[in-house]
Amino acid sequence: MNLKIAKISLFSGMDKELSYLVPKELEPKISKGSMVRVPLRSSTATGVVMEICDNPPQREEKFSLKRIYALVQPEPVLTQDLIKLSLWMREYYGCGLQAIFESLIPSIVRTGKGALELKEVSVVKLPGADELEKLSRRAPQQAKICSFLKNYKEPILKSALIKMTGVGAQAIDALSKKGVIKQQAREVVRSAFDDDLSSAELVSPVPHILNGEQQKALDDINLDIESGEFKTRLLYGVTGSGKTEVYMRAMKSVLENGGSCVFLVPEIALTPQTVGRLRSRLGDCGLVVWHSNLTDGQRLDAWRALARGEARVVVGARSCVFAPVKNLRLIIVDEEHDTAYKQDKNPRYNGRDIAVLRAKLCGCACVLGSATPALETLYNAKNGKYLLSEIRNRIDGRKLPSVFIADMKREKPGTVLSRILCEKIAQRLDNMEQTILFLNRRGYSKIFECPDCGNVEECPHCSISLTWHRREDIVKCHLCGYTAKAPSRCRKCGSEKARWRGHGTQKVEDIVAQMFPSARVGRMDRDAMNRRDNYRRVLGDFRAGKLDILIGTQMIAKGLDFPRVTLVGIIDADISLHMPDFRAAEKTYQLIVQVAGRAGRGDGNGEVVIQTLKPESAPIQYAKRDDMNSFLEEELRNRTEFSYPPAMRLIRQIFRSRSEQKLAFYTEQFARAAEKELEGICQIRGPSPAPLEKSEDFYRWHIWYFCPSVKPVVAAILGLKKKFPMDEDIDDVLDVDPMSLM
């Protein structure tokens, strides 16, 4: 008997494929991408079928191959394009398939959990009156069940039968063995579409009339889709230009022609608004939601609906790009510049870049949308690698907001809200209009500093200062989560002169409440959004006009549309300029433009107040003038001069150890070995301590590799790691195309 051979990659961490025989009875059910259970030594393991061969490889003919035990999920857990994608990610990001599978396949699916099943009881043949009387003497509980079931012609849940009769499960099982009744499991069909966003904000199903720029962009995207070929298009559109309307029409066209769509957004906070809009416009397309706040049950339902082809649109954050969509014809990445698309643990992928690659593997269209495109994306568009469509005007002829710069050096020391910002907030309250105040810093105050000894209260586990959360009167590390009671004096010298400096969103909230006591104020940051539905509730209240002022961090800067907002205040606009990061200017520019874009999206004109200590800095001046091209040209010149991306590719290798001395020594030795091993294929800078020198009790050093091509360098680094005698107390990770250099 000539059995087929399956090459299986296991979830157990063994980073090589093993061969198993496919039993004849499983051959029709098993294909590439199937999840199976197999014997492994004296135990069992689960894995994915990566390949099926008719004949075993020569080197394995002398071995007796074991057989696959069982198929775990009825649907393949990986589509054909996702199998290719996982193999590409292994080479490009330099990590094992196990870590990749953890991103591609939800944990609830990997555990083998199937559909929810309930046991039902139905009558086969009930005993007559005489038999029932005898049964009542012999087995009164069984007789009680029979008497009860006389009135039930339809199946009844076993749990309900036990509850209503008070009998035990053993009596039901005994009757089942006698053939009086039968028990069978029924799959519970839960709707994958009844998620917690099913009642999200809806918009009119009647589409707006597109302006000329929108129509041109839509025509371009539709041509990409109709070509049936891989194409990536950057859709650059100023804030409030109606990019979402273009997305929805392109998706509708795909659905009408039998295709499916993936729609990525950077933040969970954007999901309710996006889902509401799409469900209103796209109708009964089977839209499912995909993000980290889903319950296991919701995630399983969504995954099964996509794997079976019942759902044809999936909306969600970064991991949504791996959804098992059938007949994928369009991928949209909204706010493509956003750093939230980059994962900070293995595999350290960028959802935007993976979207482009998946579109290539599927031969479909990919649209990258933004009002502030990443420099790398714009570089690809200018060089012809990506296509480009532009929408330079807001819809309905609405004007971009007027921008005012408040130089905080001219305000009193310690001022949080400038005079001009306070005046404009008061005007909005008088006019019953809304205000957004943005500060990208959580907590109440950032630094507890002693003037006598100069000590700053730091986390004992990380090299950053502790933040004061006044309501709980605790200090918290926003890296590792360490908390302690807030100090009242310097812990080092005991001085009572130590004071808190700086301000976060909690302090701004208190100041606003004191200055404008009649205002209804909401706050949106990670601390306030600690429950699953909090972000949806706060956004819903703000949209409904139940709040006058919304204070928040980065999550309010992206893509949200509030027609009543006519004022945006950006507090400490230059925070990100101080970061030791070659992207600092770009991130500052993007953040200012994105936050400013929340103003004036309705009928009223918008205004923006930018508070800064560096009003002359390039990103702030270019953002004020809305001159993206000049800013990006200057930024590209600066990057090219120092070989930073996009001029070159960057790989960052981060080393960690609890021993500072060992870390410094071994990282230096590895860098010397790398200079010899990688000579001619990259430039090496470092090693040096990372800007965030200590995190969660681990000291951190890093090496930077600048190269024209990633894969050869990653392969060389992995090869060097195998033969380098690294101390067991030191671990390292590769971060390809890093978005943070901390």
Image: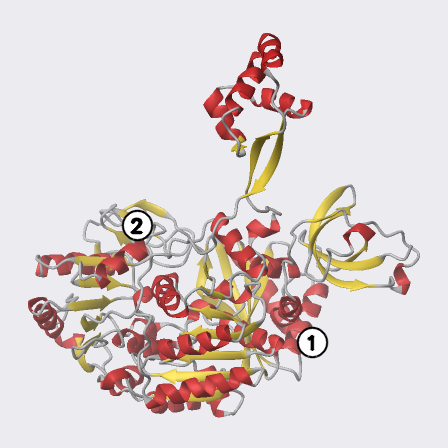
Say which residue appears at 21% left-offset and 58% top-offset: 522
Check the image and name the residue furthest to the left.
Answer: 430
Check the image and name the residue furthest to the top.
Answer: 137
Q: Earlier in the sequence, mark 2 or mark 1?
A: 2
Q: Amino acid at mark 1?
A: Glu
Q: Look at the image and tell me whether residue 156 can be seen.
A: yes
Q: Amino acid at mark 2?
A: Val
For residue 133, side relative to residue 46 (left or right) = left
Above-or-below relation of 13 to 146: below
Horizontal and vertical percent position of residue 318: 48, 65
Query: Please, what secondary structure does the residue beneath circle 2 have?
Result: strand
Say which residue appears at 21% left-offset and 81% top-offset: 401
Above-or-below relation of 121 to 225: above
Q: Which residue is mark 2?
A: 475
Q: Residues within 10 Å of mark 1 (few under 14, many from 20)?
A: some
Residue 677: image tag: 1
Pick the front one: 398 or 14: 398
